[in-house]
């Protein structure tokens, strides 16, 4: 009996904290790209979840690929686009206010929102990109920081030196998630032969995007 009473006593002495995470899976003909969406960018997170649940992305293309840079998708006009046709102008009729955070850097494998050159840095309501990038040295990061006025933590520098990324985009675009599995799929897509507008010669279709809510519990 004493042992049975011990657990309730322990439960009462602890504080339960709760965190909510959304996971997403982008299915391609090569396999799945698995991601989680950041909680510190709730507008972008919730918009992506809304579009995924509405099957908005199903059948769209990764219409722009640039090696050592990124792959871009989410253009609704790409669903029935003619081969080689220019893409990238499709939208959903609204923008999302920028949620640019110093801690969300453009390391390799992050999910970020595309945008036009609007002064508020508001994001496209639907188009996104996944970074591939390249590795950087301390010297190159110093030069970039001088141009962008970005201050990197030691941990962020280490990520850019060892994993790589696209640091020149920091401070200009909203990063709202990251790949947890399937960067090999991203690498296959980014290295596809492409035309002068960076559209792959062979359509790189997003078969479907699905999201799932994950509940995490922490005892403190």
Image (cartoon, rainbow, N blue to C red):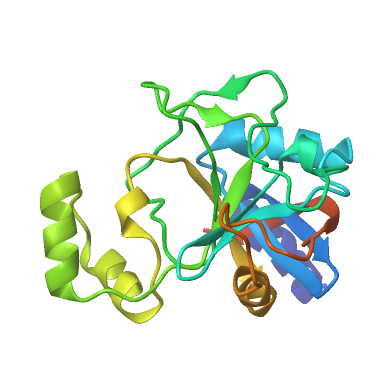
Q: Position of residue 102 (x, y in %)?
A: 32, 46
Which of the image's four quarters has the N terminus? Answer: bottom right
Task: Answer with the quarter of the image where residue 139 lies.
Answer: bottom left
Q: Nearer the viewer, residue 172 or 9?
A: 172
Relative vertical location of residue 114 with respect to residue 182 in this rendering, above or below: above
Q: Residue furthest top?
A: 93
Q: Is residue 43 left or right of residue 213?
A: left
Q: Position of residue 181 (x, y in %)?
A: 67, 74
Q: Please give the name of the residue rendered at 20% of the width and 48% of the height, measured from the top-left corner.
A: 150
Q: Position of residue 157 (x, y in %)?
A: 25, 69
Q: Please give the name of the residue rendered at 84% of the width and 52% of the height, measured from the top-left corner.
A: 210
Q: Nearer the viewer, residue 67 or 208?
A: 67
Q: Nearer the viewer, residue 191 or 51?
A: 191
Q: Is residue 32 visible?
A: yes
Task: Answer with the quarter of the image where residue 133 lies.
Answer: bottom left
Q: Nearer the viewer, residue 4 or 78?
A: 78
Q: Position of residue 76 (x, y in %)?
A: 78, 36
Q: Please give the name of the residue rendered at 56% of the width and 57% of the height, measured from the top-left corner.
A: 196
Q: Please give the name of the residue rendered at 67% of the width and 70% of the height, measured from the top-left corner.
A: 189
Q: Is residue 16 visible?
A: no
How many labels were placed on the picture? 0
Relative vertical location of residue 199 with respect to residue 188 in this rendering, above or below: above
């Amino acid at each position: 009996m004493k042992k049975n009473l011990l657990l309730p006593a322990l439960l009462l002495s602890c504080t339960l904290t709760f965190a909510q995470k959304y996971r997403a899976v982008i299915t391609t003909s090569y396999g799945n790209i698995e991601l989680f969406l950041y909680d510190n960018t709730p507008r972008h997170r919730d918009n992506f979840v809304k579009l995924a649940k509405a099957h908005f992305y199903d059948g769209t293309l990764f219409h722009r690929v640039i090696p050592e840079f990124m792959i871009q998708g989410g253009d609704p006009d790409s669903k029935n686009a003619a081969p080689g046709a220019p893409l990238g102008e499709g939208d959903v009729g609204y923008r999302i206010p920028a949620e640019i955070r110093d801690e969300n850097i453009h390391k390799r494998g992050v999910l970020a929102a595309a945008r036009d050159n609007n002064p508020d840095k508001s994001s496209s309501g639907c188009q996104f990109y996944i970074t591939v990038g390249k590795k950087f040295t301390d010297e190159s990061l110093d030069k970039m920081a001088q141009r962008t006025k970005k201050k990197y933590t030691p941990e962020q520098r280490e990520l850019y030196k060892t994993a790589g990324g696209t640091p020149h985009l920091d401070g200009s675009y909203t990063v709202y998630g990251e790949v947890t599995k399937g960067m090999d799929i991203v690498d296959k897509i980014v290295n596809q032969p492409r035309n002068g507008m960076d559209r792959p010669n062979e359509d790189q279709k997003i078969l479907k995007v699905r999201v799932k809510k994950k509940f995490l519990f922490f005892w403190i």
